[in-house]
Amino acid sequence: MVKPAKNTICLWYDGDAEEAARFYAKTFPNSSVGTMHRAPGDFPSGKQGDVLTVWFTVMGIPCLGLNGGPAFKHNEAFSFQVATADQAETDRYWDAIVANGGQESACGWCKDKWGLSWQITPIALTEAITDPDPAAAKRAFDAMMQMTKIDIAAIEAAHRG
């Protein structure tokens, strides 16, 4: 067995951790699916031999998918934030998540089909809302508050005033 990272994000799934890991690996760069471990015995949400855990990496972040069953659901208290370089990259990730059974939310947030939240955040947005000019930052922030997927051109226009 490969020695695990000292700190790993453990994500709870209802039997479909492998499907989620494969989706993340094909969608995001520097992502992959690693070792899967099967349950050595029956457990509350599965049987001996079912996939119990899946080791995977999402954009360089080590994760463990645990097929723990229906008891717990993902919520916005945890999200992956993806810093995007341009509109094409923003659209690519957002559209992949939403088109694969996910759903749009507000201000650059969306959820994948497993309920995991993603912030698809253009670097241009972060720069605009942290501008030392408070009026410029507020204009960009107010524009963002009206959006689902972030429109970089609209953020930049609002930022400029």
Image (cartoon, rainbow, N blue to C red):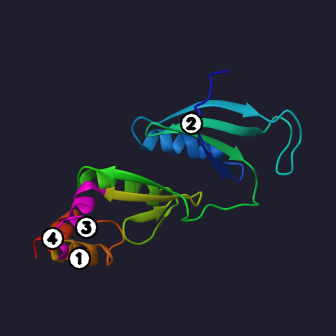
The quarter holding residue 121 reads bottom left
User: Distance between the Cα atoms at labels 3 and 2?
Assistant: 33 Å
Q: Say which label, 3 or 2, has the lower sequence index.
A: 2
- Residue picked out by circle 2: 56
Amino acid carrying label 2: it is Phe
**With 17 as the anchor, is 49 left or right in this view?**
right
Q: Where's residue 120, x and y in %?
A: 37, 57
**Region rendered in magenta:** 122-134
**With 64 as the anchor, is 26 left or right in this view?**
left
User: Distance between the Cα atoms at labels 3 and 1?
Assistant: 7 Å
Amino acid carrying label 1: it is Lys
User: Distance between the Cα atoms at labels 2 and 4?
Assistant: 41 Å
Residue at (56% x, 42% y) in the render: 21
Q: Say which label, 3 or 1, has the lower sequence index.
A: 3
10 Å crowding of disc 2: few (<14), some (14-19), many (20+): many
Residue at (41% x, 42% y) in the render: 28
- Residue picked out by circle 4: 133
Q: Say which label, 1 or 4, has the lower sequence index.
A: 4
Residue at (21% x, 71% y) in the render: 137
User: Distance between the Cα atoms at labels 1 and 2?
Assistant: 38 Å
Q: Say which label, 2 or 4, has the lower sequence index.
A: 2
- Residue picked out by circle 3: 129
User: Distance between the Cα atoms at labels 3 and 4?
Assistant: 9 Å
